């Protein structure tokens, strides 16, 4: 399997997620884009899914060997590692790249202080 765009990423999650996050994915989802690293030293994408009642899950998708992918449930978004500003990487940009770039910049500025 290859994930080339947002639709393919969401399709992969529909085939993989357990019941409650899957229902939330079908209700409302937001691709936050690519992160390097996302989890420890591994790059990946993060999708925020929200249920009808407002419960949220942060779901990380990590590329693995042999075109296989893994999912991880995350506690927080590592905005300082957002890489959606790289050229030619539409899947990494996410749904609201200007907002995500601002979050990344704010965190990096705070770390400099």
Image (cartoon, grey):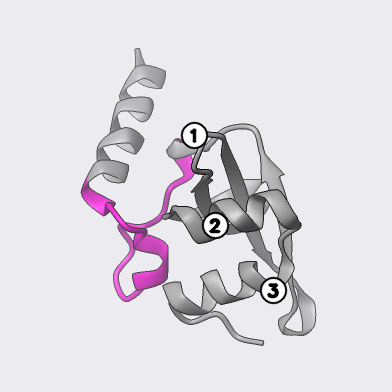
Task: First in sequence, mark 2 or 1: give its number.
Answer: 2
Chain-order first, disc 3 or disc 2: 3
Residue 62 in sight:
yes
How far is disc 2 from disc 1 in space, using C-alphas?
12 Å
Residue 76 covered by magenta stretch: no
Compared to residue 65, the image places residue 97 above or below, namely above
Task: Look at the numbered disc 1 and give the secondary structure of its residue.
Answer: loop
Q: Is residue 4 above or below residue 83?
A: below
Q: Position of residue 40 (x, y in %)?
A: 70, 44
The residue that disc 1 covers is: 54
- Mark 3 to mark 2: distance in Å? 11 Å
In this view, the mark in front (3 or 1):
1
Direction from residue 36 to residue 113 in the image, left or right: left
Residue at 44% x, 37% y: name it. 80
Circle 1 Cα neighbour tier, 10 Å, few/some/many (<14 / 14–19 / ≥20): few
| Residue position for label 2 | 25
Residue 93 belongs to the span the image colors magenta? yes
Looking at the rendering, in which quadrant would you find the C terminus? top left
Q: Secondary structure at mark 2?
A: helix
Q: Which residue is mark 3?
A: 15
Q: Looking at the figure, which quarter contains the N terminus? A: bottom right
Is 21 positioned to the left or the right of 31 in the image?
Answer: right
* Stretch of the chain drawn in magenta: 80-98
Number of other residues with Cα within 10 Å of mark 2, as a class: few under 14, some 14 to 19, many 20 or more:
many
Pinpoint residue 82: horizontal percent, then vertical percent: 43, 48
């Amino acid at each position: 399997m290859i994930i080339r765009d947002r639709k393919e990423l969401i399709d992969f999650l529909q085939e993989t997620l357990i019941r409650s996050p899957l229902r939330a994915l079908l209700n409302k989802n937001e691709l936050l884009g690519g992160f390097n690293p996302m989890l420890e030293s591994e790059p990946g994408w993060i999708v925020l899914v929200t249920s009808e009642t407002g419960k949220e899950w942060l779901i990380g998708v990590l590329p693995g060997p042999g075109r296989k992918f893994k999912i991880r449930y995350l506690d927080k978004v590592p905005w300082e590692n957002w890489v959606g500003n790289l050229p030619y990487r539409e899947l990494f940009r996410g749904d609201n790249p200007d907002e995500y770039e601002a979050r990344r910049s704010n965190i990096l500025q705070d770390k400099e202080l």
